[in-house]
Amino acid sequence: MARATLIGFTAIAMWALLAVLTAASGAVPPFQLLAMTFAIGTLVGLAARILEPAGAKARVPLSVWFVGIGGLFGYHFFYFTALRAAPVIEASLIAYLWPLLIVLGSALMPGERLRWFHICGALLGLGGTVLIVTKGGSVSFDSRFAFGYAMAGLCALFWSAYSLLSRRFQAVPTGIVTWYCLATAGLSLVCHLLLEQTVWPQDTTQWLAVLGLGLLPVGAAFYTWDHGVKHGNIQVLGAASYAAPLLSTLVLIAAGAAEASASIVAACLAITGGAVLASKSMLSGGKRRTGSGAS
């Protein structure tokens, strides 16, 4: 289980590159960028399938396809809809409820037990995320943007549900994420053609940024996340997911696109402390019941 959890952590690390690579990709519209990067993410899965020895082909239930495609495409569709219909800060905070929802929802999973340190760790992470997104300032929710807030809530709900329900299909190999990515690329292309004007990357740097997005945060990350939530400690992964916006901010600071501040330091302490607290049972080597075998 510890190994699978560590593999899941790599997804969080890769998502930290999302902001800096997206900024470097230029003025490519969101759904066009999704179509391009998820197409590359599909190639990542196809390459892995070529390198791995062929295994027995199992029939995949229809419900698995709904969960997978709905999770990947639904999350991004509602996220971008929310950003268009509500202020970025408030919409981002609502959308970032998904790690907390994963931790709380894990109590409903077979073989899982929700403990006080899982909840407290997730809440500390949420507090740290608030500091990052608001930059230590205030948050104001306006009823005029209720639709956008609702879209952000659906965004959080879709990703947490996808992560939790994926654990119920542990027998389904991670390679199926290849086809989730392909379907998401196709649906994103449809949205792009209906809602956006096409804008291509203008230089080599922008094309490399698009390639980097497709290979890592919008590619390999979804495969390692799938393996982590299916076979690792999903409560620890949920709480640790709050590290993604922190790591993203640190990457932006290192790239000169953001400045360090006291709120960033406080967020670092809160999120790190929350992740360590949520990992209490794993770090102490305590045994816990789980619905999966060791991996």
Image (spheres, grey):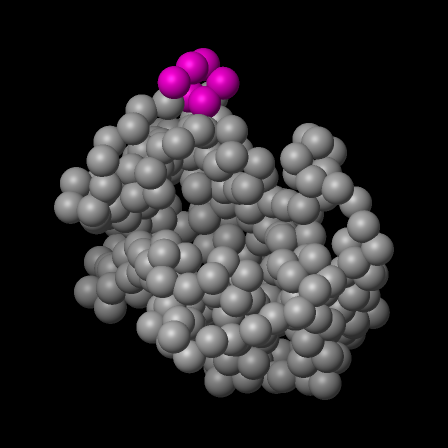
Residue 205 in the magenta stretch? The answer is yes
The vertical placement of 124 against 134, above or below, is below
Q: Nearer the viewer, residue 112 or 121?
A: 121
Residue 275 figure quarter: bottom right
Q: Nearer the viewer, residue 149 or 269?
A: 149
Query: Residue 49's x, y, as percent?
Result: 36, 35
Q: How many marks?
A: 0
Query: Residue 229's x, y, as percent?
Result: 51, 62
**Stretch of the chain drawn in magenta:** 202-207
The vertical placement of 244 against 283, above or below, is above
Say which residue appears at 79% left-offset and 45% top-offset: 260
Q: In this rendering, would 280 be left or right of 207?
A: right
Say which residue appears at 84% left-offset and 55% top-offset: 262
Residue 61 in the magenta stretch? The answer is no
The kind of secondary structure the magenta stretch mainly shows is helix
Say which residue appears at 35% left-offset and 43% top-offset: 30
Q: Is residue 192 visible?
A: yes
The vertical placement of 4 against 55, above or below, is below
Query: Residue 282's x, y, as percent?
Result: 74, 67
